[in-house]
Each structure stands twice: as C-alpha cells, then as structure tokens.
Image (tube, helix red, strand yellow):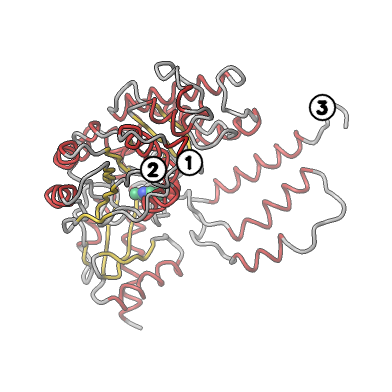
Amino acid sequence: MAHGDDGFAAALAAAAGYSQAWLDSLPHRRVGPGRNASELAAVFGGPLPEAGMPAAGVIDFLATQAEPGLMAMPSGRFFGWVIGGTLPAALASDWLVSAWDQNAGLRYATPATAAIEEAAGHWLLDLLGLPSTADVGFVTGATMANFTGMAAARWRLLADAGWDLDRDGLFGAPRIRCFVGRERHDTVDLGLRYLGLGKPTEVDADGQGRLLPAALDAALAGGTGPALVCLQAGNLHSGAFDPFAEAIAVARKHGAWVHIDGAFGLWAAAAPELQHLTRCYEEADSWGTDAHKTLNVPYDCGIAIVRDPSALRAAMGLHASYLVHDADGPGDPFEKVPELSRRARGVPVWAALKSLGREGVAAQVGGLAGAAAAIAEGMAALDGVEVLNDVAYTQVCLAFGDDDTTRAVTARIIEDGKVWMSGSRWRERDILRVSVSNWHTAGEDVGTAVEAVRSALAAVRNF
Ligand SMILES: *Cc1c(COP(=O)(O)O)cnc(C)c1O
C-alpha cells in the first residue's frame, strides 16, 4: 500500500475511540463481565480465516465483541485480588511503547528507551529509599521480579560457597536453605521452583501473618550452609509487613541473603504516613515489586531491584560470569532481566512517576490506604460484619458469621455487580477480601462498597 495509507491511521483511530468509550463506561458499568470465556471462544474462534481483513475492521470486531466479556478491573469499584488501575500518562505512554516497537535490550541500539528506563530506575530507588547504586530490571510482574532477585541470590550464595553455577549447574552444588514466612505469597514458592531450589522452610507468623523473627532465628540455627530468607512487604490478606529490622538482623547473623516480596507493599515507603511499615527494609539484598499494582501502570510491569549489580548481571546477563566487567556502569537492560528481547515496559513507569511526582505518588499510595481504612470503618459499623485484620495498609478482610454466610454474601455481591470483591480463606475461615489499589477509588466508591456489602448481607439473611 502507498505510504500514508498503510492501514495504521484508521486502525489507531478506531482503537483510540474504543479505548475512550471503554474508559468512559467504567464509572457506570456493571463491574463483572456479562459473558464467560467459553461463550466468547465461539465468537473469536472457529476456523482460521482463509482471507484477511483490513486492520480497522479487525479492531472494530475485536472491540465490539470483546466488550461484554471485559471485567471493569480499572474501575474505582473493583476491589478484587490486588489489581491496580491505569494512570492516563502510563496508558498513553504504553501505546507509544508499542508504536515505537523498540527491542529494549541494548543501550547502544535503543538509547531512548534505555535512558528512560535508567531514569525511572533512579527515581524509583530515590522514591522507595533503596540504595542508589542498586540495579533495577523491568520484568513482567512480581513473580518474575522475585524470581530475578532470588536468581541473583542463588548465584551469589553459590559463588561465595566456591561453586561455579554457570559451569557446573545446580546438581551437586551446596544446598541453599530457603526460608519464607508461613503467609508468603505462593508465587515466591514458584520462583524458588523455577530456580531449582525446592520447597522452602516455612517460618511461623503472628496473627496478622507477620513472620516471627525468633522463629526465623531458630530455623536458621537448625542447620548450616548458604541461606536465602524471603520476607514480605504487604500480606495479601491483612496487608501486614514483616518486622524488617528484627528479621534482617537475624538473617545477617546467619549470613543469609534477604529478599523482600513487596508486590504491592513496597510502595508504602513512598508515603510519609506509611513509611513506618517498611522501616529498615532497605537493609535487604533484593526487592521485588509490581508497577502494575499500586503505581497503576498497565499490565504487565514488575520491578526487580538488586543491591549487588554484579550478582544480578552474572545471573541474568548473556555472558559467562568471568565476562562481567561493567558492574559499576549502568549496564545493558538485558543484563538485569530474564529476557533478551522485550518491550520497553519501564517507559510507563517513568511516565507515571513524571506525571505524579514524589508528592503525587505519596498522595496516591496514602489515598489507597485511607480508602481501605474508611471502608473498614464503614463495614465495622454494620451489624453482623467482622473486620478480621488490623487495617494498616490497603487490605480489608471481612467475615459475616459462619463460612456459609460469608460465601453467600460474596456470591451475592459479585452477582449484584456494583462492586467486585474476592472471596478467600484466611486463618481457617472463609472471608471476603477488599483490596484498594486503584487511584480512581474515591469517597463515593467507598460509600458504594459499604452499601453493596450491607445490601448483600441483608439479602442473604432474608433468603
Ligand atoms: C501479586 C503478588 C505477587 C505476584 O505478582 P504478579 O505481578 O502477579 O506476578 C507476588 N507477591 C504478592 C504479595 C502479590 O500481591
């Protein structure tokens, strides 16, 4: 086709229009999807078409047919799992990333995206109060961020034990003892499994799910050899943070590497009124977080941060460990993440931070915790509702008497469609979890959430 009419203009205009219509629908629409995946599979599936179709037509079909199957995850009334939302600058910059189509692995080949991601990395370290010389890698999510941090740990611990991991692999290597809190996120185990490190030892936790430092001490003292301790900033249920000062001191005493899974909790460090939750967490060796949760950039974007760049680049770089020579320089982006080829997913992080500024991030994170506190307060005032956790961050766990009632109320809330909250099981009980992680969630959404729970409970009781 002639230049200027190669199909882009019509397709992009259509995509922008449908995107705006979707965003405009968020404040009003039912939160849950109206059709299930099996129904939609018939719409999108069937035999592979023999003939193609113009790009704009593809976008028309896609947008109109997908719409009934979309969950209003980016709405201020979505409180399920820990999801996030999308800031305008983050979304628009994500479109640019696709249009630019840079393979973001090499500094010299894609200097713009390399410079943008380096700037985002420095801003993050400053904002989160982490060592300014740490390496930052942009990965797909916290699962991979934790995997990446723990891969650096594995490399360093084995190198210190005199084992050449790159040459000899894992078979026959000294065993790395891995310790996690009883309530760590399951994806930490997944990362350890990918790394061939096996099942971690569970360390006892308190009633909010915080690891007990004395129990960690006893567990570490029960053996010898290299050790990796994975702590948590932000418990999926309670929102609680492990006691970093005490736990890291214990780990240090035993020579262990400390990694912190802070998928949504690391951001507490950016809000002055929440900073007490992350006290001394900067003394760890590596940290994993998500930008697609609390920071509110589009999926998929996680961040791996490692204090010792040489360990990260040895673990992830494409070269053998003996070629690591530029650990003091910025390094190529590919040396800090598992992938060689990837999109420049750090660009939306830069755009989010540029648009919010330090004050804006603090206000956003503080606002999420404030909304969670307001929801908890509203719920606690309702007859028959128990708030099960100390609401210090963004998570609220509720129960309504027995498990059957809690499950029935959860199902009713989802069916009503005014808000979305997920059911879970915590401390031997079925619960309803409320997670506030979208910048859009405002006062009226708090009221809507409390009213949705009240009316669902009333309906279940009158059944
Ligand atoms: C979400 C989450 C993860 C996994 O993150 P992904 O982005 O889904 O890979 C890990 N840990 C915690 C505490 C989480 O909330």
Q: At which x and y percent is residue 258?
A: 27, 39
Q: On the image, numbered disc 2 is attached to which residue?
A: 146
Q: Residue at x 50, y 60 (%)?
A: 30
Disc number for residue 221:
none
Sooner in the amino-acid sequence: mark 2 or mark 1: 1
Marks 3 and 1 in Cβ contact (< 8 Å): no
In the image, farthest residue toward the bottom: 463
Q: On the image, numbered disc 3 is attached to which residue?
A: 4
Sooner in the amino-acid sequence: mark 3 or mark 2: 3
Q: CA distance from mark 2 to mark 1?
A: 23 Å
Q: Is mark 3 within 8 Å of ligand 1?
A: no
Q: Is mark 2 within 8 Å of ligand 1?
A: yes
Q: Label 3 amino acid?
A: Gly
Q: Label 2 amino acid?
A: Asn
Q: At which x and y percent is residue 141?
A: 45, 43
Q: CA distance from mark 3 to mark 1?
A: 31 Å
Q: Is disc 3 surrounded by few (<14), some (14 to 19) or many (20+) residues within 10 Å? A: few
Q: On the image, numbered disc 1 is attached to which residue?
A: 86
Q: At which x and y percent is residue 137?
A: 45, 31
Q: Secondary structure at mark 1?
A: loop
Q: Residue at x 32, y 36 (%)?
A: 157
Q: Label 1 amino acid?
A: Thr
* Left or right of residue 14: residue 442: left
Q: Nearer the viewer, mark 2 or mark 1?
A: 2
